[in-house]
Image: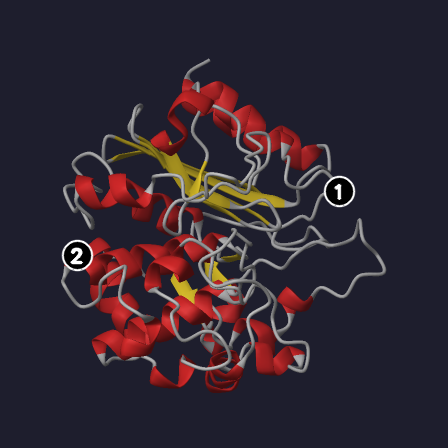
Amino acid sequence: MNLETKLQQILNDTVASGEECGCQLVVYRHGELLYDLSAGYTDASRKQKIDSQTLFPVFSVGKGVVTTLMHILAEHGILSYDDPVTKYWPEYGCNGKENTTIRDVLSHRAGLFTMPPELTLAERFDWATVSATLAAAVPEDTVGGKHHYHAYTYGVLTGIIAERAAGKPFEELLKENILEPLQIDTLFFGLPPEKFVNLAKIDGTIFSDVRIEYNEPNVLSGLNPSSNGCMNAGAIARLYASLIGSGADGVRLLRDDTIENATRLCRLPDEPLNFESWDKFGLGYALCGPRKNIGRMFGHGGAAGSEGFADKESGYAVGFTKNRLNTTHPVHPTRNAVSCTLGLPERIW
């Protein structure tokens, strides 16, 4: 049985067992597409099958996309990591946030790690409202101090900085700097109405009493790159393929020195590090390499188990999407089986 057949069998078996509803797996190596696989269904009814073009809500996987955009702007000289946020976003400079740098934001040290509770669900995905609220907010911890994962605020903070620094809307920056160079048309923050027909829904049947907000149109059509991106595995894998080696089919988005800088662990000397935890970050990217070379593998996972990453050593770039919520998160047996088959370390994120 060849490698492609083994990987497809993993997807088929996990769907047949009920562990997963639908999933996609796309693998590049040394910049070339090796496998584009899918199995399963678009929702819990198991009536409509997915294909390689089906879009999935990918939660925090989108953070890796906006992180890449920030590093592109830094390479182009549009912003610098140690610039104060107020250089581009003056109204942010209040209530103890005056000295926040872009580096603080990228390394999850901005101190605004919780979405302000006064915001409604709809307001959390309204760009203008959430941006103004964060600009006026009081930090929850010392700016530039210990790391706190900015689960719902990271994408807004980075996105607004990108907009202000470049003088263009976030969607335009994404298109010009990532989507067009890589010829990607299956990656969205703010899903257009006509694309909902091609969207897989989150299968939350294992949590029957939980509201699945990320199936709701007002959430997915809004804008918050922290969590409401919709894309397929092909777009994710192609993005990460463009960050290592010769790029994706020869298209390289970031230089080696930029990637090396972005994948160094950001941690204070007195800050404990649990290598068994997913919470290990460079400048925006989550780091998932082995203990002796933690920055070897980098990317980002998402709440339902989707992920994207690149491995500098092996040359693999992987995109994986899935739509069933699992009680084992952030451990996902399907991902682990794929990793074992590819000869890669397992990831917990």
Is residue 169 placed above or below 11 in the rendered structure? below
Coordinates of residue 191 in the picture (x, y in percent) = 47, 72
Coordinates of residue 281 in the picture (x, y in percent) = 45, 44
Is residue 214 placed above or below 182 in the rendered structure? below
Coordinates of residue 165 in the picture (x, y in percent) = 24, 75
Is residue 8 placed above or below 127 in the rendered structure? above
User: Which element is circle 2 on?
Assistant: helix
* Name of the residue lying farthest toward the right: 209
Which mark is drawn over residue 259? Answer: none
User: Residue 133 versus residue 248: which sits nearer the camera?
Assistant: 133
Q: Amino acid at mark 2?
A: Glu
Task: Tell me what residue is drawn at x 36 percent, y 50 percent.
Answer: 283
Figure quadrant of the C terminus: top right
User: Residue 346 versus residue 181: which sits nearer the camera?
Assistant: 346
* Name of the residue lying farthest toward the front: 270
Q: Give left or right: position of 131 versus 28.
A: right
Q: Give left or right: position of 85 versus 258.
A: right
Q: CA distance from mark 2 to mark 1?
A: 40 Å
Task: Please give the residue where the numbered disc 1 appears in the rendered image.
Answer: 327
